Image (cartoon, rainbow, N blue to C red):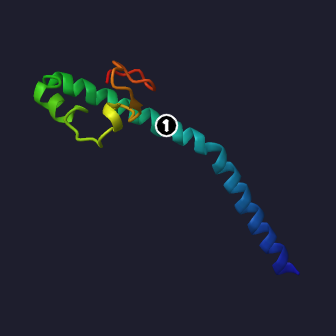
Amino acid sequence: MEGLMTGYGIVSILLLVAGILAVFIPFFILKIRNQVISINEKMDKIIKLLGGESEEWVEVFSSEAIPSKAAPDGMKYCGHCGALNGRWDKSCVKCGEPV
């Protein structure tokens, strides 16, 4: 009987610790998110200090340079979100970016 009660005590302590940790998990996630945002801002500053985005870089990584699947009947896929747009559409019907 004494061993059984000790087992319940250990389980209750573990559940208490798990509950306390569960309360703090959102704060850890927010801290990581804020650190990622901070790193991205620093990277933008570094890129601007080093001369910004060159025309060659933009050409290599632009959506037009990436081959895409063929759209049916002259329609076009959006390079930003991948939505199917009409032949004469100037901007994407889903995200509004220029096609």
Q: Position of residue 23 (x, y in %)?
A: 66, 44
Left or right of 54: which side holds 41?
A: right
Left or right of 73: which side holds 24?
A: right
Specify the quadrant of the image occupied by residue 65.
top left
Residue placed furthest toward the top: 90
In this rendered view, identify the residue nearer to me: 20 or 94.
94
Residue placed furthest toward the left: 56
Mark 1 Cα-neighbour bin, 10 Å: few <14, some 14–19, many ≥20: few
In this rendered view, identify the residue nearer to me: 14 or 81.
81
The residue positioned 41% from the left and 20% from the top of the image is: 96
The residue positioned 46% from the left and 39% from the top of the image is: 32
The N terminus lies in quadrant: bottom right
In this rendered view, identify the residue nearer to me: 84 or 1.
84
Mark 1: amino acid: Lys
Left or right of 93: which side holds 71?
A: left
Specify the quadrant of the image occupied by residue 58.
top left
- Residue 18 in sight here: yes
Q: Check disc 1 and report its element: helix, strand or loop.
A: helix
- Residue 79 in sight here: no
Question: According to the image, label 1 marks what residue?
Answer: 31
Specify the quadrant of the image occupied by residue 90.
top left
The residue positioned 25% from the left and 33% from the top of the image is: 63
Residue placed furthest toward the right: 1
Q: Position of residue 2 (x, y in %)?
A: 86, 79
The C terminus lies in quadrant: top left
In this picture, is 4 found above or below 10? below
